[in-house]
Amino acid sequence: MGKQLVILLFLFGFLMPSYSQSTTLTLTPEQAEQLFLTQNLELIAEKMNISLADAAIVQAKVWENPTLTVSDLNLWSTDTQREGEAEVIPPLFGGFARNTQFSIELSQLIQTANKRGKLVRIEKISKEMTVSNFEEVLRGLKIELRQALYELEYVQHYLEVVTNEIVSLTNLTESYSRQVKAGNLPKSELLRLQSALFETENERLETETERNRLRKELNILLNLPPHTELFISTARQDWVDPETLSLSALFEIASENRPDLKLSVLQTQKLEKTLAFEKAQRVPDLTLSASYDRYGGVWKDFIGFSVSIDLPVFNRNQGTIKAARIEIEQSRYGEEMQHNTARNEIVEAWKNYSLIYDFYRRIEENPLLTELDDMLDSYTRNLLDRNISLIEYVDFLEAYKSNKQTWLNSVKNLAARFEELQYTIGTDIK
């Protein structure tokens, strides 16, 4: 499937003459989804956030830079400092730093209580949250794609129904026009047929407008050229019987696969790691220093070392730690609410799917559905042969369209409800 799709897309791009000319592309839903996963611009952009999260982890591992300080530097010297021509301060080498006093200090911050390690752990959880965010975007876009594919498939089939009606009505109108001119039929019957024909043609225009809208949405989702005329080729699908699906099993699947549930858990974990980091902030960091002082004190070349540390007398990060504990408690309530919401969504989706599945099965078992097209041809011939009245024909035409539309709607709604059920558990039902 993958290689075939690559070849198909290569030929599609190679043979496409220009953006100003319409190009027909026929895909199965599986091919459309593969194309979506590789070409959707929103997914590509969202996936880059994972690389940004990796960069944040790298940055969290980095040590603080050392600090170099040059101080007590005199940029010039006075006569008094030089004592006439005598050199009070000799140069370091050559003529460099003659009569010049200065001090240099190099210091390095040392984080205590494993603060850097705790910060790295926070960033790693942030990356997991970024991955879950990407999966949530993918989940939302995937159901949007599939729903649009089912809608386009429905429109394609309904256009066939409307076109069949138009062909039948056109043939009848032409025949009735000749009969009216010959004086064999009243104009009122021809007017009735023309009215039905115009109404059906208007319905086709509205349906084609809807098809254009769906093609626009799919072209954006699949990142296709704007003049692409997409057709969906589908095979008969065996739908899963809802009675074979256990709600408890669906709950478990959702807890393992739904990105928003993972996010709620990861949010609590991140706040717990943040609390540990804030507690570590109570432990003062050390600053180690090494300094060189030239003629600044008793010794002309003094090298010294020092250690500095904050004294946690007043600020022990009490407020931030208290706030972090409250945020953890809030997050746990949010996590529980998110899981409860998910379970209710699953029950609702399962019930809706069960309802449409039962309706779909009842319609599918109706033997008349497969005979509707033949019956339309038969009614058209019988009307031409004057075996039935125009009223009988128009009544059948309405019943033909209604039955076809009901059947197509049941298939579309069944697919939509099934996708909603899969959306609520966060993965495909095998």
Image (cartoon, rainbow, N blue to C red):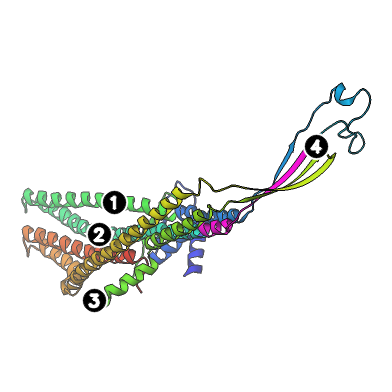
Q: Is residue 104 magenta?
A: yes
- The residue type indicated by label 4 comes to Gly
In the rendered image, residue 176, in percent from the top left (x then y), is placed at: 12, 54
Pointers 3 and 2 in contact (CB under 8 A)? no
Q: Residue at x 11, y 65 (%)?
A: 382
Q: Which of the two labelled residues, at mark 1 and mark 4, occupies the earlier sequence position?
A: 1
Residue corresponding to mark 2: 158
Q: Earlier in the sequence, mark 1 or mark 2?
A: 2
Residue span colored magenta: 102-123
Badge 4: few (under 14), some or many (20 or more) residues near its Cα, within 10 Å?
few
Earlier residue among tags 1 and 3: 1
Image x and y of residue 402, in percent:
15, 61
Identify the residue under disc 4: 297
10 Å crowding of disc 1: few (<14), some (14-19), many (20+):
some
**Residue where numbered disc 1 is placed:** 210
Q: Amino acid at mark 3?
A: Glu
Q: Which residue is mark 3?
A: 243
Looking at the picture, how far across and down is residue 302, in whole percent? 81, 43
